[in-house]
């Protein structure tokens, strides 16, 4: 199983970025996907999660209305559209995948078995 995250970069406050996570190697069920971020000096936190059947989404309050997670099944790719970015969104963003993740644990990094390498997002003028 491999996850390849991309799309990070430098963006001005108020700008947008779309992160991609190419997922390969899952031979059975489509995995649940989580996007997490880790900023210097801060704990890793979930920013968006999507269930196996694409029917349950999770967004923490600090990204609601700004971030959107979606999946293109044909391309085996999951996206994180980020709008209205601010300096507090600066972090390394990771995608993670796993099977059998129940709703109550979707925001916990330990629930996911596979992780991408991370992509840096810097919001600065």
Image: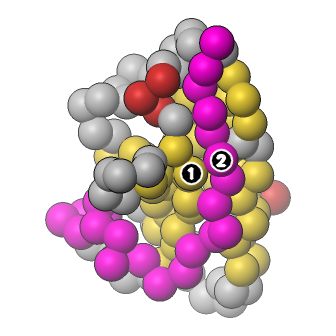
Q: Residue at x 28, y 67 (%)?
A: 108
Q: Secondary structure at mark 1?
A: strand
Instruction: Please tell me which of labels 2 and 1 falls first in the chain.
Output: 1
Q: Based on the displayed image, in which of its 4 quarters is residue 36 positioned?
A: bottom left
Q: Which residue is mark 1?
A: 92
The foreground one among 21 and 75 is 21
Q: Secondary structure at mark 2?
A: strand
Q: Are marks 2 and 1 in contact (CB under 8 Å)?
A: yes
The foreground one among 120 and 82 is 120
The foreground one among 94 and 43 is 43
Q: Position of residue 112 (x, y in %)?
A: 42, 77
Q: Position of residue 55 (x, y in %)?
A: 40, 51
Q: Which mark is residue 120?
A: 2
The N terminus sits in image quarter: bottom right
Magenta residues span 103-125
The C terminus sits in image quarter: top right
Up-down: is 96 above or below 55? Answer: below
Gap in angstroms between the C-alphas marked 2 and 1: 4 Å
Q: Residue at x 65, y 47 (%)?
A: 120
């Amino acid at each position: 199983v491999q996850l390849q995250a991309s799309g990070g970069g430098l963006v001005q406050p108020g700008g947008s970025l779309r992160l991609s996570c190419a997922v390969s190697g899952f031979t059975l069920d489509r995995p649940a996907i989580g996007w997490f971020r880790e900023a210097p000096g801060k704990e890793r936190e979930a920013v968006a999660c999507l269930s196996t059947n694409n029917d349950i989404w999770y967004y923490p309050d600090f990204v609601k209305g700004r971030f959107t997670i979606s999946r293109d099944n044909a391309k085996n790719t999951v996206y994180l559209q980020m709008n209205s970015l601010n300096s507090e969104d600066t972090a390394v963003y990771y995608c993670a995948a796993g099977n059998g993740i129940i709703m109550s644990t979707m925001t916990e990094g330990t629930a996911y078995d596979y992780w991408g390498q991370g992509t840096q997002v810097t919001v600065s003028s």
